[in-house]
Image (cartoon, rainbow, N blue to C red):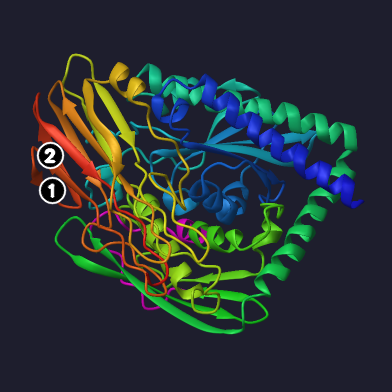
Amino acid sequence: MSPIELAIFISRTEAICAEMGALLQRAAFSPNIKDRLDFSCALFDAKGGLFAQAAHIPVHLGSMAYAMSSIVDGVEWQTGDMLVVNDPFLGGTHLPDVTMIAPLFIEDELIAFVANRAHHANIGASAPGSMPLSKRIEEEGMMIPPTIFMRGGEILQSEFEQFTQFSGADTGGDFAAQISSNQAGLLRLGDIVRQMGACSFIAAVEAVNLYGARLAAVSLGEIPAGEYVFSDLMDDNGFGLRDIEIAVTIRVGERICVDFAGTSSQVEGNINCPLSVAAAAVFYVFRCLMPDTTPNCAGTFSQIEILAPQGCLVNASRPAATAAGNVETSMRIVDVVLGALAKPLPDRIPAASQGTMNNLAMGSHESNTPWDYYETMGGGMGASRLIDGLTGVQSHMTNTLNTPIESLESHYPVRVLEYAIRSGSGGQGAFNGGAGITRELLFLEPAQVTMLTERRSRGPWGLEGGASGLPGQQLLDGKVLPAKFTTQVESGQRLRIETPGGGGFGSK
């Protein structure tokens, strides 16, 4: 395959993923998917190896890339099948992220898989928004093992009704949108395979992986050989345990070994994460060191080995709760890997970004019109040797959008009183960290509110003499709340959220 043919093939397959995402967004019912874009789409070969993805959510795609082969292995696939899974210990992230996988058969030969993953605001947890302050995974909602729910292109109604039992139209509509997204992916990918022929297609996928491995080898080869160590602390587990350590040692030689030995054991609370999530964070950091044109495929990450003791915070075992591990711990893993790499690559690594997704889940299951809402909020990015950090944006393991005020107020009994830049929250330096945001909500009806946040005890660190960004905080009617809490609010109460600023770079 010539370089031009390879480039065209990569562009065509990535375009399929982008089209799957566009269809999913437009067909979805919930603001979480259609407005915030909390979903991802990707293509995999017949053995579950990633060979194409769109620029969606790193924590979704990296975890799928790490674990897809184990998900699809052992299933007796048939034409027209579709499988659903959300088990974090089988390649998922946390229970609200539901993955759908469909096989592509050409003349009875299994050729590839299409997959999407989307976040559902109600997956059956007792707390509205299905992001509870939990101790065990059973408290976080319905866990779906790998389950075939379509056979021969027909929905198995009993399974489908089980998955959509919690919040009616939104959940059912979002599942239907995921089905349609995969069906569109199968149609487009099938066209490419038929045009090329199955053998040529398989050879092209192999060429993509070899190309990705070559580009990765060049980029990773620029990291000086050696052993680099860094650690950072999670604020708390939500139940009184504070300063929970994530430690990493990166050994650079012919391969890259990222070793989390020394990391705290899994905890009571939901900041634990499965190894697939830790892998997603590691892959993301090293992918950022590679050229933009590097394909996101299995070959690109084949030279990176990840080690973590079984039962530690970043390789948790059942029945550990994981709701915040996907969103909060993944961000801290990025920080520690970047912190370690700042030693051999001081000119290329930025200061710490906000280090949290500022998770807000709220709603009511008691009102005449039950509702569930979930969103993550942007903050400050860390500065680098070349530029100030960006202000008020999502960073690292998520690139979802904010929920527009108009959408929030039209769907839910909430009014937005303030949505602004949190001036002065970025760390100062030769280049300043980006500022966080302030968002204040007025509740028009009683509701239950849960927040799962980090960087409330200490701000994101600066580099090369740059100052740390300001920690975040949340206040209910002016009273400061913990980093992780759940509470009942009444009509007329105000919740104010101030997100962290990014760290500064260099001395003033």
Q: Nearer the viewer, residue 40 or 478?
A: 478
Amino acid on which disc 1 is placed: Leu
Q: Quadrant of residue 287?
A: bottom right
| Marks 1 and 2, how far apart at CA | 10 Å
Identify the element where label 1 is drawn: loop
> Is residue 473 shown left or right of residue 185?
left
Q: From where the camera sits, is residue 366 visible? A: yes
| Residue at the spot 57% in from the left edge and 49% down from the top edge | 71
Q: Main secondary structure of the magenta part?
A: loop
Callout 1–callout 2 Cβ contact below 8 Å:
yes
Rendered position, 256 above or below 429: below
Highlighted magenta segment, given as a residue range = 259-279
* Name of the residue lying farthest toward the top: 368
Q: Residue furthest right?
A: 2
- Between 145 and 270, the residue placed more toward the observer is 270
Q: Which mark is drawn over residue 481?
A: 1
Q: Secondary structure at mark 2?
A: strand
For this rendering, which residue is in front, 289 or 249? Answer: 289
Residue 487 is tagged as 2
> Looking at the picture, how far across and down is residue 249, in whole percent?
47, 78
> Is residue 252 shown left or right of residue 432?
right
